[in-house]
């Protein structure tokens, strides 16, 4: 049953040095679930009915509505917990270790059913990609083994798999989130000059000849997959450990799009730099990317990888759609100031600008109306706490962690899809008695006394305003017919070619005139007759002018030979004879000049 917009948001769990506390956002404490201070990990089931945590002694699973403990598992070293989509299975991972008695190591990945009974266990050395993956209906479970992906039907992983996907060098895989047909995407890094590639398969056809889509690329050491909600497309973020161009200390990144229809493209980003965040809209028809050196850009792309809307530049490193997809949050956390920009996705108009300083965590509430920002350890050990906000800018709840205590994690209690209605972005925020944080005035940059009171002539970072991509071009194209657009292009190209030809002709004539002037002046100086300088620039050259030019050229050569002879160089016979013709050449030049 859908809840009304005026109802309070769901409860959230805060894990810290004082334990795990399940609280309502109205401020009343529901139940203190753990009193110890060694709660290393906690996890909700996808429907929010179960909560599991490890306190260093055992793993406890609680029924959230009743508050009763369902079962406990004696696994004190557990570091990771994950429920299957329907909550039927619980996967636990603890660090891999070997002993003298068992040099091969003992299984450290355990899977239990909803009653706490062990289903199966494996050896999983690496923490990255440790958890088996299920489809949303839990009909298929997949697990990564060396060069293989083992698939189990029925949702219960076992010792023998029903189907295998075998590719040499396979390192990473991801199971689609949607329902039938189930899809698996795998990544194989390149070696010996061969490119890396990503391939998509439809379960149960996992043969090499049954590839649905493929994408190859270079510059990739690791990848991360991001499926859309329908399971019809996946985004592949590639990362290299070292940027060979030296532009970034953290390596180089790229973004690729692979569709179940066989389409694959590279997402063209208009600014160089790292990719901070990628988020799909829950409607599976678009995605938002935050990228580029600071100030970073944020752009919405459609499923053709064409930019739809450019939010300009700003100090941000995160993009998150609310669960209904009608509100987009752009924020800058971590080493950034904590600015939060909320946008209406339908109208692409800003809703509210906030500032949550020193925030390290952000999460949308399942109702799509509220969100939480938190300052957590170990990133920041001072000023820990969390705040619950309404998207209109109202601060609903503010919880500060007591002195000498730390907050490690904050999580909303999940609810099944369809529990909450789609919020209206035109609704007003409810009244609140909590004092709103005062926005501190930004300190002006220092300016020398001589420049104070004068306008700025430059900016360190010129920020770009938001704009709809290609809006002006689309309007102009709509006004003109196809034939008119074609004729316009022809006229523009013809005019451009004429302008280029004119520039070439002008430059050529200018160079020719300057060259002739220099040659004429040099010949007259060599003769020693400065009174009779001939201007060779004219509309055309007669035969006498051409002959005069050749004679001057010979005279220049004779002067060079005479200089070489004076320096002691032995000349050839023909060169000596050429020097003897100097007087006759001078007389002929004089006659042609007088005529």
Image (tube, rainbow, N blue to C red):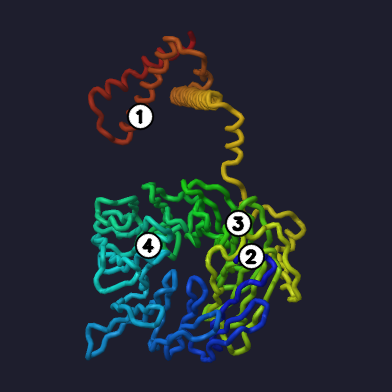
Does label 4 or label 1 sit earlier along the sequence? 4
Residues at discs 2 and 3 in contact (Cβ within 8 Å):
no
- Residue at the image position 71 percent from the left and 63 percent from the top: 448
Does label 2 or label 3 sit earlier along the sequence? 3
- Is label 2 or label 1 in front? 2
The numbered mark at residue 326 is 3
The local secondary structure at tag 1 comes to helix
- Residue 254 visible within the image: no
Q: Relative to 358, say whether 20 is above or below.
A: below
Does label 3 or label 1 sit earlier along the sequence? 3
Residue lying farthest top? 595
- Depth check: give the residue in front, 485 or 549: 485
Residue under label 1: 560
Q: Could you say which quadrant of the image residue 405 lies in?
A: bottom right
The numbered mark at residue 175 is 4
- Pointer 1 local density, CA inside 10 Å: few below 14, some 14–19, many at least 20: few
Percent of width and height locating residue 286: 51, 52
The local secondary structure at tag 2 comes to loop
Q: Could you say which quadrant of the image residue 127 lies in?
A: bottom left
Residue under label 2: 369
- Depth check: give the residue in front, 124 or 88: 88
- Depth check: give the residue in front, 199 or 518: 199
- Is label 4 or label 1 in front? 4
């Amino acid at each position: 049953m859908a809840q009304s917009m005026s109802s309070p948001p769901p409860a959230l769990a805060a894990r810290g040095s004082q334990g795990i506390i399940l609280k309502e956002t109205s401020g009343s404490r529901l139940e203190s679930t753990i009193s110890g201070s060694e709660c290393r990990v906690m996890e909700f089931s996808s429907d929010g009915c179960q909560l599991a945590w490890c306190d260093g002694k055992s793993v406890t699973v609680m029924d959230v509505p009743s508050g009763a403990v369902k079962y406990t598992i004696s696994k004190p070293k557990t570091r990771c917990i994950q429920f299957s989509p329907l909550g039927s299975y619980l996967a636990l991972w603890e660090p891999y270790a070997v002993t003298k008695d068992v040099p091969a190591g003992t299984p450290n990945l355990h899977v239990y059913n909803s009653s706490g009974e062990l289903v199966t266990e494996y050896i999983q050395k690496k923490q990255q990609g440790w958890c088996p993956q299920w489809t949303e209906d839990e009909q298929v479970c997949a697990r990564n083994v060396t060069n293989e992906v083992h698939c189990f039907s029925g949702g219960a992983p076992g010792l023998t798999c029903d189907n295998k996907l075998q590719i040499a060098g396979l390192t990473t895989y991801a199971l689609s989130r949607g329902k039938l047909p189930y899809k698996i995407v795998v990544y194989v890094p390149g070696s010996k000059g061969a490119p890396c590639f990503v391939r998509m398969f439809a379960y149960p056809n996992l043969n090499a000849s049954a590839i649905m889509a493929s994408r190859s690329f270079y510059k990739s050491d690791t990848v991360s997959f991001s499926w859309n909600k329908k399971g019809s497309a996946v985004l592949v973020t590639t990362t290299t450990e070292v940027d060979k161009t030296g532009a970034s200390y953290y390596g180089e990144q790229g973004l690729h799009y692979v569709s179940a229809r066989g389409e694959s493209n590279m997402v063209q980003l208009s600014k160089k730099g790292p990719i901070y965040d990628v988020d799909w809209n829950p409607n599976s028809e678009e995605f938002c990317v935050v990228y580029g050196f600071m100030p970073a850009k944020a752009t919405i792309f459609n499923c053709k990888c064409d930019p739809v809307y450019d939010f300009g530049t700003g100090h941000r490193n995160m993009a998150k759609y609310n669960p209904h997809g009608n509100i987009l949050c752009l924020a800058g956390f971590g080493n950034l100031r904590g600015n939060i920009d909320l946008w209406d996705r339908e109208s692409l108009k800003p809703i509210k600008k906030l500032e949550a300083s020193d925030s390290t965590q952000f999460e949308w509430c399942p109702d799509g109306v509220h969100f939480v920002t938190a300052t957590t350890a170990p990133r920041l050990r001072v000023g820990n706490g969390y705040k619950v906000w309404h998207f209109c800018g109202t601060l609903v709840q503010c919880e500060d962690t007591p002195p000498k205590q730390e907050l490690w994690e904050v999580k909303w209690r999940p609810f099944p899809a369809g529990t909450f209605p789609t919020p209206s972005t035109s609704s007003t925020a409810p009244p609140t008695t909590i004092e709103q944080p005062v926005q501190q005035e930004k300190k002006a940059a220092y300016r020398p006394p001589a420049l104070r009171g004068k306008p700025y002539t430059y900016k360190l970072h010129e920020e770009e305003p938001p704009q709809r991509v290609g809006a002006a071009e689309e309007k102009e194209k709509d006004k003109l017919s196809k034939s008119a657009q074609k004729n316009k292009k022809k006229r523009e190209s013809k005019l451009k070619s004429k302008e280029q030809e004119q520039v070439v002709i002008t430059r050529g004539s200018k160079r020719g005139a300057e060259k002739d002037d220099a040659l004429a002046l040099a010949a007259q100086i060599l003769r020693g007759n400065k009174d009779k300088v001939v201007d060779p620039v004219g509309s055309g050259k007669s035969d006498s002018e051409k002959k005069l030019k050749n004679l001057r050229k010979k005279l220049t050569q004779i002067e060079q030979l005479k200089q070489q002879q004076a320096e002691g160089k032995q000349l050839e016979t023909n060169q000596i004879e050429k020097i003897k013709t100097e007087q006759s050449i001078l007389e002929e030049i004089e006659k042609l000049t007088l005529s």
